[in-house]
Image (cartoon, rainbow, N blue to C red):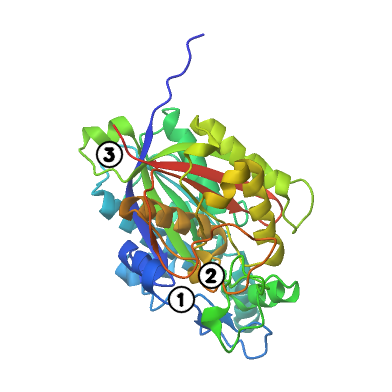
Amino acid sequence: MPQRLLHRVVITGLGALTPYGAGIERLWQGLCYGAPAIGPITRFDASDLAVRIAAEVPAFDPLDFMEKKQARRSARFSQYALAASRMALDDAEYRATPQEAAGVFMGTSGGGYDVADFVREAERRGWRHVDPLFVQKIGGHMAAVRPGLDLGLRGPSTTTNAACATGLDTIGHAFNTLRLGQAEALLAGGADATLVKIAVAALGRIGALTASHNDDPQRASRPFDAMRDGFVLGEGAGVLFLETLEHALARNARIYAEVLGFGESFDATDETAPDVDGQQRAMHAALRDAGISADEIDAVKAHGTSTVLNDATETAALKAVFGDRAFRIPVTAPKSKLGHAAAASGGIEAVAAVLMLHHQMLPPTVNLEHPDPACDLDYVANGPRPAVLHTLLLDAFGMGGQNSCLVIRRFEE
């Protein structure tokens, strides 16, 4: 039986909606030179909660990206997905035609956290007056459906969820679909809007969120610092436009980077606590898939959540993969500036990683002030660092043990 030809897959468009605002330039400038985009919660009254800070998307108007009718039919997460998708297509200078079947792979937590609002409204007005668009609004499938509908993309469409690994996991599956020749172009990434009171209250109760910096929010997210005590919940969307190399060259597209490999694993140990073996398995799998050795990785985009267990576990996993070289590989944690955007974080941080290759610069891991013996690598503390970057390893680890890693490289014909 003849062996299937694998296609090279490249990144030609970037879109981001983040706590720094809309667009990749705002994201990049914020990550490198801005203060952390974290402040008091304004989306709802958090005065009765232990956690009263978050990383909110500022001043978002869905009508900047979609018609009023579509906006009314869409929950916030699918509005975010469309916004970042539209930006990625514009950046790629791609226009869909009936002859070309680009598609959408999007990761999200969906609108499940908003169910209580719909129930309360139905009980107030009467169940005969329930919102008829309830299913269309909260269904996670709408993260891919809304961009596909509004942008006219008729190719493969799917929505995924792997907790905090979702965005990167989705990009990995899009990469596999493209290199197998099952599509020529795909939007892929993550979009999430879990900044609702029930989520903040619940995550605060289990100690996942930091409650010690309500009066000093910009110092709250501190990956790998000895004083870290939980993450800051964020939101937004990050989307890549991926193409087979043949498709990109045929339309003379500008190419940012190439996706080399993707790896996944499952901890199978605990519902919340991460596992060193599970994480390093995903890293090794990504390197094997890319066909490269660990020595070829120039830097790591860490998951770096600012939780006690995750940061120590990720550090140990990096040591298991890179050995003594782990101490010489720079590691950067975007969540120190952006907070943790849940299912969207992998997509947003993949956009950031591509920009690292494009600008040959590593954004800093801020608030790294107190050394932790368990976290003793080079975390690019304090300020941005110019670097010669060819190949990056991207980590994303989901609560529950779902792990995803991606290898990307500067494009070389």
* Residue at image mark 2: 339
Q: Is residue 339 left or right of residue 229?
A: left
Tell which tag, 3 or 1, sits nearer the viewer: 1
* Label 2: how many Cα within 10 Å (few below 14, some 14–19, many 20+): many
Residue 251, quarter of picture:
top left
The answer to which of 271 and 159 lies nearer the viewer is: 271
Mark 1 element type? loop
In this view, the residue farthest toward the top is 1
Q: Is residue 80 above or below residue 157?
A: below
Residue 117, numbered label? none
- The image's mark for residue 37 is 1
Give the residue drawn at x 38%, y 31%: 8
Asked if residue 175 is positioned above or below residue 221 in the image, the reply reads above
Q: Quadrant of the C terminus?
A: top left
Figure check: 141 above or below 1: below
N-term-proximal mark, 2 vs 1: 1
User: Which residue was labeled with disc 3?
Assistant: 98
SS of the residue under disc 2: loop
On the question of residue 150 being in view, the answer is: no
